[in-house]
Image: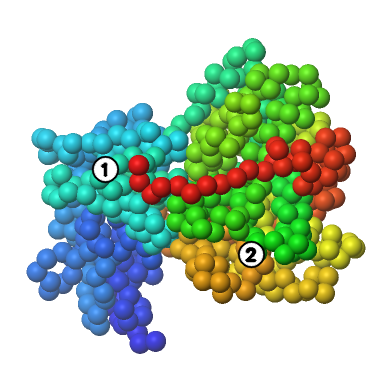
Amino acid sequence: MEKVTLKINGMPVVVEKGATILDAAKKAGIKIPTLCFLKDCNETGACRVCTVEVKGARSLAAACVYPVSEGMEVFTHSNRAVEARKNTVELILSNHSKNCLSCVRNQTCELQQLSQDLGIRDVRYSGEVTPPTFDDVAPGIVRDTSKCVLCGRCVSTCTKVQGLGVLGFQNRGFQTKVGPVFDKSFADVNCMQCGQCVNVCPVGALVEKENIHDVIQALNDPNKHVIVQTAPAVRASLGEEFGMPIGTRVTGKMVSALKKMGFNRVYDTNYAADLTIMEEGTEFIERVKENGTLPMITSCSPGWIRYIEFEYPDLLSHLSSCKSPHMMFGAVLKSYYAEAKGIDPRDIYVVSVMPCTAKKAEIERPEMKKDGIKDVDTVITTRELGRMIKMYGIDFTELPDSEFDQDMFGEYSGAGVIFGATGGVMEAALRTVAEVLEGKSFENVDYEAVRGMAGVKTAALNIAGMEVRVAVASSMSMAKPLLDEIRNGTSPYHFIEIMGCPGGCINGGGQSIISASIRNGFKAIDWKKERAKALYEEDELMPVRKSHENEQIQQLYKNYFEKPGSHKAHELLHTTYSKKERFK
């Protein structure tokens, strides 16, 4: 590869030809501030926050898109460059809502940090502001254009990562805003509610709908028996809300915090992940033996479910009929648990702590109710749980480790833990399906071929003398080619796992916000890989690593469901999906 030598602030730097000034500065250990830039996704130079001075050039250059050349001299912090940045940020602030103290992104806001770094103490510009739109109609995501900085990161993510293009720029000039077509609500268009737009928004223009106070109200209601369940991916991210390194596994501390808050029971959704494998694995085996619809596609991700209902409704028969794990758990808690404890299901309030904003929409689906009672009452995200712990005055980092409540649903397998990473559902299913079909136990249960952060992973396995072809995809842009193959009748696969978010739930729309420095590679941390590593480590530590060996799951079938796929199991643990219209 051809090299280029340039000087940055008088220091020689050698980079590959085609690199940008921003790339060269990063290599030299010099941080140039950015706002609109999102590596490999949104590289437009639109905000002009990264402007630098190039010797001999008439105007300042946007470092994120300006290519280096041999002999170039760059000054990243000259008076001219710094003043231009300050001027740009002040202009953005002049049209920006300044309710910082009550904003959910307070202290994690990139615009706030920019203002601090640039020493902005006052805004010299004032006047009219762009007429705002406030949309809190959708169950999962709130849009407030009074805080939007028009960076375009959400637009590019929705288009390039998810392949939907729900968000776009509207109007021109001072009237410009970002939103769904015709400024409609997220609730009225083909939005997945995945929350990837929330994760990349630098400010508070896109945030999750907050349900913390619904939980607090339930905890303070003496007539409510409040149960909380936590998804596997939450334990790999929650610590970040308290300054702990990315990928720190905080399972025990999380349980301690939840018990201090006063929940009547603290359970792990991993138990229900094991239950899901029993039902989904049985369904797959039946389809294989009875020449049912193949490939079968997993149905754990509600964002993915919304996508197929909007974009590929002709393929709905390929979906597993299983509910997602936390919805299964909610159904079990309000039936089997309620009967065993002698509690009216209407008095049981189930809270799911999820890494996902789409789960907030999932619990509102009419299919997720029985006799008018919701399976799950409230969903809060990892971020919301972090805020709630702080609200309760709990010193999270100093908490001792505690165990989940062990009565009835306390046991879970390593297979349940890895649900949080892309490929985890597939691997968990294969651990059970292979042993059921082979009729014997396997010591090695690590299916390495379906692990990793690649957008699409495939494998061909010999199980009981039959070649089983599987595929794993995360994000809709990665899933689309697999779906097109099914639609065209050319799919070679028997079983496909699809997750709505890149990397799976560990990178869900409700997880801790990853800073721009990390996303853009200024800090060498692969946050998805680190979070996944925490889950695989817990899996390896578990005494039971296969869902069908979970003794409490075995007891559930013995005492209540009889067997996987039974009539009662279908009544409570399975559901149906239907075509959705793109616009209302």
**x, y (%) of residue 56?**
12, 74
**x, y (%) of residue 540?**
76, 56
Q: Quadrant of the C terminus?
A: top left
Residue 290 vs residue 172, the one in the foreground: 290
User: For residue 472, which numbered disc appears in the image?
Assistant: none
What kind of residue is marked 1? Asp
Q: Is residue 433 left or right of residue 17?
A: right
Q: Quadrant of the N terminus?
A: bottom left
**Of all residues shown, which one is farthest toward the bottom?**
2
Residue 142 occupies quadrant: top left
What kind of residue is marked 2? Pro
Residue 138 vs residue 447, the one in the foreground: 138
Residue 84 vs residue 529, the one in the foreground: 529
Q: Is residue 451 above or below residue 236?
A: below
- Decide: few, some or many residues near mark 1? Use Cα within 10 Å; few <14, some 14-19, many ≥20: some
Query: Which element is circle 2 on?
Result: loop
- Residue 332 seen in the current view: yes
Residue located at (59% from left, 36% from top): 368
Residue carrying label 2? 295
Marks 2/1 in contact by CB < 8 Å: the verdict is no
Comparing marks 2 and 1, which lies closer to the viewer? 2
Q: Is residue 444 above or below residue 127?
A: below
**x, y (%) of residue 27?**
38, 70
Residue 12 occupies quadrant: bottom left
**x, y (%) of residue 49?**
24, 55
3D distance between C-alphas at marks 2 and 1: 38 Å
User: For residue 183, which numbered disc appears in the image?
Assistant: 1
